[in-house]
Amino acid sequence: KQVPFFWVGSGGLARELATAEKIIASQPTEVTAPASKRGPILTVVGSASAVSDRQCAALLKGSQMRMLEIPPEVLTAGPLHPDWMKHTAFANESMQAGCDLIVKIERSSEVNGVSAQLSQQLARLIEPSLGLAGGLIATGGETARALAVVAGLQALQVIGEVGPGINVLLA
């Protein structure tokens, strides 16, 4: 399962990429997108910051995007949680219908930040939807790495920068 574009806007990604085994890097340049697979955009928000919440609200405002918020307890329990399949099905059905989708971890008083475990479980939950995406936007270094692992990405190539710190990577 490979996703043609992997968009990341996270300072935390640098640490995650540094530990990856096979990274192909080049100097960021103006983005000229190569021919890509058509499909909806999947946005996965692993960051628990207020900035990410405002960005999600801005994306949703006046758009046709769908939103899927996953409670942390579903991710902690994993596939054995009774709601796991419901969330997986919603993501998959949304993507199959051609709808752009935002998936994020629901904010709760128990979760101040997003752990590597929650990010890995989030990536596992939406794994069936990854192959349907025409593009992928990820926030949070842990989340970006978890998605790359679940998608089976062998290498990432920096092909440009859409803004300071917001790289466009080609798988």
Image (cartoon, rainbow, N blue to C red):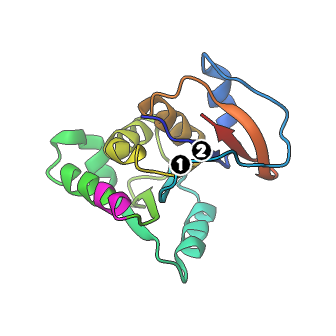
The magenta region covers 92-97
Quarter of the figure with residue 123: top left
As helix, strand or loop, the secondary structure at mark 1 comes to: loop
How many residues crowd mark 1 within 10 Å: few (<14), some (14–19), many (20+)? Answer: few
The residue under the point 47% across, 77% down is 64
Q: Toward which corner of the image does residue 80 lie, by quadrant?
A: top left
Answer left or right for 32 relative to 140.
right
Lower position in the chain sequence, tag 2 or tag 1: 2
**In the depicted view, which residue is nearer to us: 22 or 54?**
22
Q: Residue at x 34, y 65 (%)?
A: 97
Q: Within 10 angstroms of label 2, few (less than 14), some, or many (20 or more) residues?
A: many
Distance (Cα) linking label 2 and label 1: 9 Å
Judged left or right of residue 50, residue 105 is: left
- Residue under label 1: 37
Task: Answer whether residue 123 is magenta in the image.
Answer: no
Which quarter of the rendering shows the N terminus?
top left
Residue drawn at 71 percent across, 23 percent down? 24
Q: Quadrant of the C terminus?
A: top right
For residue 125, the mark is: none
Return the mark for residue 5.
2
Q: Nearer the viewer, mark 2 or mark 1?
A: 1
Query: Could you tell me the amino acid type at mark 2?
Result: Phe
Q: Is residue 156 above or below residue 22?
A: below
> In the structure shown, which secondary structural element does the residue marked by tag 2 occupy?
strand
